[in-house]
Every structure is written in structure tokens, then in C-alpha cells.
Image (cartoon, rainbow, N blue to C red):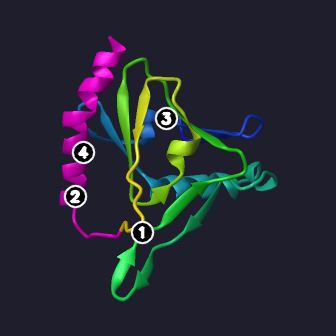
Amino acid sequence: MALSVDWATRVITVPQADLTLTGPGVYGLDLDVFRLALKDIEDGEVGIAHPDTHRHNTEVVLSGVTYSRFVEIINGYSVTFEDTGTPYVVVASGANSNLADVVNLDGSASLVTQNSAGLVVVQSTVVVDEVAAAVEERVVPHVWAAAR
């Protein structure tokens, strides 16, 4: 199953297979990859006739500091992560977003966002590894405990 949009209900569905496994029960969602996949759907034969799913502002360099992009889900669309029957955590990264405001958490997925007014682009995977480790240590046990 690939990323899909139900145009009638305005629900964007993200399959677990489209996420990046970063640790036991923890998956990453690169918001830039996500918005590019949405744009491909919107540009398709069926999608072109429907309202845009999102708004995107790219990275901006101010005084030598690269500030992060943002991705905003708009026009009444919501996002659902695949219900696999097993609890898992999705860590959205790479951009500020309103994903926490539009996510449907009625399945087995939980969402962690990392919005910041001063979110800057850092050319290092150490930050991503540290966030994944922190989520695995602090969030995953609570998700498993709640599922029991």
C-alpha cells in the first residue's frame, strides 16, 4: 500500500511501510519526503481536480542560519497512520508542521512532533539518533503499557 488520499473524506493515509524504522516500535516520517509524495498525488490525473492537501515553505537562510521548512496540512484534510494492530510511534522530523493538529489517532500509531520557533537545519544525524533514542526510552514503554 502506498501513501493515499481519500478525496471524498479528505483523509491522507500513511502506510507503515512508507515510514523509516529507527528502533523497536519507532518509525520516522521525513516531512519533506511526505510533502513531495503528496505533491505527486496532487499532480496526478485524479488529484489535480481537488483542493491542495498542504502548504509548504522551504528552508530560509537568515544571517547565516538555515531555518527549517514547514509543512501545513490545509483545506480540511487529516492524516491517518496505518493501523497495524501493534502499537508503534511515528516521529515526524525535518520540518515544522501542524501534523499534531490534523492527525487521526484512532489506530495503533502515536505521533511525536518536533516543532520549534527556532528550528534550524543541522547537518548531522547525531540529533536524529538522539531523538530516536529518547523516544524509544521515554515514549515506547508508555505506548506498550497502554496497549496491554
Name the residue tied to disc 3: 15
Name the amino acid type tagged 1.
Ser
Residue occupying the point 21% across, 43% down: 134
Disc 3 crowd rating (10 Å Cα; few below 14, some 14-19, many 20+) is some
Of the residues under marks 2 and 4, which one precedes in the sequence? 2
Q: Secondary structure at mark 2?
A: helix
In the picture of the structure, the residue carrying the numbered disc 4 is 132
If the image is split into quadrants, where does the C terminus sit?
top left
Q: Which mark is residue 68?
A: 1
Whichever of callouts 2 and 3 sits on the residue coming sooner in the sequence is: 3
Q: Which amino acid lies under the numbered mark 2 shown in the image of this protein?
A: Val
Image location (x, y in percent) of residue 83: 48, 24
Using the image, determine if residue 77 lies above or below residue 31. Answer: above
Seen at 40% across and 60% down, the residue is: 116
Label 1 and label 4: CA atoms lie apart by 19 Å
Image quadrant where residue 90 sits: top left
Number of labelled discs? 4
Magenta span contains residue 128? yes
Q: Furthest residue to the bottom?
A: 63
Mark positioned earlier in the residue sequence (1 or 4): 1
**Residue type highlighted by circle 4:** Ala
Residue picked out by circle 2: 127
Farthest residue toward the top? 148
- Magenta residues span 120-148
Q: Nearer the viewer, mark 2 or mark 3?
A: 2
Instruction: Give the CA separation, mark 1 to mark 2.
Output: 14 Å
Name the residue at 51% across, 29% down.
105
For the residues carrying marks 1 and 3, which lies nearer the camera in this image? Answer: 1
Closer to us: 23 or 130: 130
Looking at the rendered image, the disc whose residue lies closer to the viewer, 4 or 3, is 4
